[in-house]
Structure formats: structure tokens, C-alpha cells
Image (cartoon, rainbow, N blue to C red):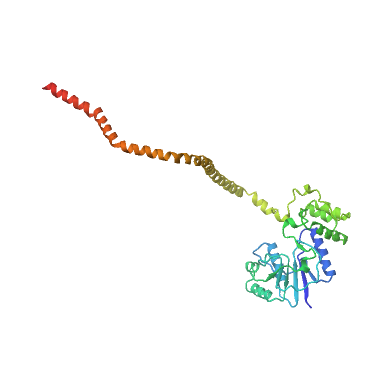
Amino acid sequence: MTLVRFLLDDVTPCKTQQAVLSVFAGDIEQRALGTVVRASQLMGIHQWADVPAESSRRLGLRLLALQPGLEQLTVFLPAHIVPGSLELVTPWGSALAAGKFSTVADLDMFAVSNTSQEVHRFQETVAANPDYETVSRYAEFTSSPLPDWMVSGGLTSALQLTQRPWYSAFAPTRLQWLRWVVRAMEQGRLDLYMVEEDIRAGLIRPSLLADVKAVLEGTITPLLPDLTLDVLFTPPERRLTDQQYRLLHLAELQMRTFKIAKQRSANKLAKLGLLKYLVYVLRKLPRLAMRVPRLAMRVPRLAMKVARLAKRAPSFALRSAYDIYSMTFRPVVRLIRQQINQRK
């Protein structure tokens, strides 16, 4: 009998999403679809000290999911999923099933056959080269699309922040996720106070409280709440940490930023001056283009004038020489002759 294991990454600071994931895990176990392994209960996950803790944890979970096993299939579910109804797990014909596969570190929601030879080769590579770069950039798996039993019931990976209903009211799975929120409240895993705590901590959008209240009152398809509440909301993944804020206010960084901005401004002004000159030249091009035909019509006349001047050039040269002689040497010669005649 094939053992099916669901590896659920339920480590998230958002209590609302934690409750939703808990209800989803309970639904899988209640329907006996497989064994659920919660990341929050795991100990001894492989870690790398030379990378950030969260990056190390994420890769460690994927490494755990890709371990060899006898008659075992593993379904990896990241923390940002929107739950759906799963069907009975059946093999899919390849070592790996993923929405898009490039490297191990980039794996999102996926299913893997732990009995595959490709999984064994991957573990051999990890044993020979256990460094983070080698493991994370491994790309020698044969991948196929996610099977229907996994996604036909609405299970979705909200990898993009705008696809997460707890961040954006325009997420396409908003109503589906709200139904799981209601189930979490009905089972006592979530209450309005926990939702308000998440809002105060900046982990979910403020307008979500109105959504939850509307669904609890029996509204099947609640209208969009007052989205002006979300104007100042920024998802935690996009916020600067306290350390980053302190770095931004360092005097040395401020001076370097000002210096670079000044250099760029000077370069921009120089480019702008050149740009103005080019615009000036380009604006004159149409006028020049209009003058070309007129200039072309004047060329024959100019050629005829040049030819006439060329014919008159010899006589003009002689006359010019005579004029110069009569104005300079001729008076001198006359004056010398008169003096000679007077002496005689």
C-alpha cells in the first residue's frame, strides 16, 4: 500500500492563516487521505549557517520532502496556500509534479514520488555536496503539471502577494478562503480577537475584519469592504526590518547617497543639454528638407554663372593687372622721368 504524506509548512506569524491551515490539515486527516506532517512540530531540520534562517528553513523542508522512501508519495504544501477539497491521491507518472520547476529552492507547491530513482540521485548529490548553493540549484528532476486530484477542488498556491486574500481584497480566491476562515471559527480555532490581533500586528489587511464579520452574519458573497482602510497597509514581506531602518539613517550612508545623487544629477543635466540640442536640430530638419528642392533648382543657375566667370577670367585678370600698374608703378615712373628731364 502506498503511503501518502502531506508535509504542511504551517510556520507563519499570522494566526488567522495558522487557523485556516490547521482546519485544512484536520480535513485531510478526517478524510483519511494521508498522514499530515506539520512543519511547526518538526525538529532537527537540516540547516545552513551561511544563509538567512528563513531561507535555510525553507530549503530544509524541501529537502525533507524529497527524501527517498519505500512506497511513499509526498505532497508539499507551503504556508501561503488557499485550501481546497482534495481527492484520493493517485500516482501521476513522473518523479515530480509541480506548477513550474526550475530548481529545488524555487519549488512551491509540489508532489513527489519518493521511490523514484531521480530522488535517490538527488540525495546522492546532497550527500556529496551538502552546501546550500549546490542543493538549492539542483535542477535534474523530470517534472509534470500538478495532478487533477490536487488542484481540481480549488487548492491554490498564493505565491504572489496580491493573490493572498489576507493581504488583498481583490485576490481571486477571497471568498473561498473566507469560507475556511468561518470553518476555523466554527471549530474554535479562530475568533475575532485573533483577527484583530493580526491586524494590529500588521500581518493582515485591516479590511479583513469587515469581511469576516459579514461572512459570520451569513452573507454568502460579501461585498468589498471599505478599502480605504488598506491604503497604508504593506505586507510584512515588503517592509523594511528594524536593522534596515537603522542602516538607512546612518550618516555615512546619507552622505554617500547625497554624493551619488549629485553626480547623477550632473550627468542628467549634461544629457539634458545634449538632448535639448538634438531636439533643436530635429526641429529644424523639416525646414531644411523643404529648402532642398529650392536649392536644387538654383544649382543650374549657379553653374551657368560659374561658367561665365570662368570665360571672363583671363580678360579680367589682364585688366586688373593694368589697373594695379596704373595706380602704383605708373605715377612713380612719370615722376622719375620729369626729374631726369629737369636736370638736363
Is 317 situated above or below 267? above
Relative to 90, 257 lies left or right: left
Of 16 and 255, nearer the camera is 16
Q: Residue 173's spot in the image, x, y percent? A: 78, 58
Is 102 situated above or below 221? below
Relative to 268, 231 lies left or right: right
State whether residue 38 appears in this view. Answer: no
Is 135 situated above or below 305? below
Quadrant of residue 75 within the rendered picture: bottom right
Considering every residue shown, the one lying at the far top of the view is 342
Q: Residue 25's spot in the image, x, y percent? A: 81, 66
Relative to 194, 59 lies left or right: left
Q: How many marks?
A: 0
Of 301 and 270, nearer the camera is 301
| Figure quadrant of the C terminus | top left
Q: Residue 181's spot in the image, x, y percent? A: 83, 59
**Residue ID at (75%, 77%):** 71
**Residue ID at (68%, 74%):** 119
State whether residue 194 appears in this view. Answer: yes
**Residue ID at (26%, 34%):** 318
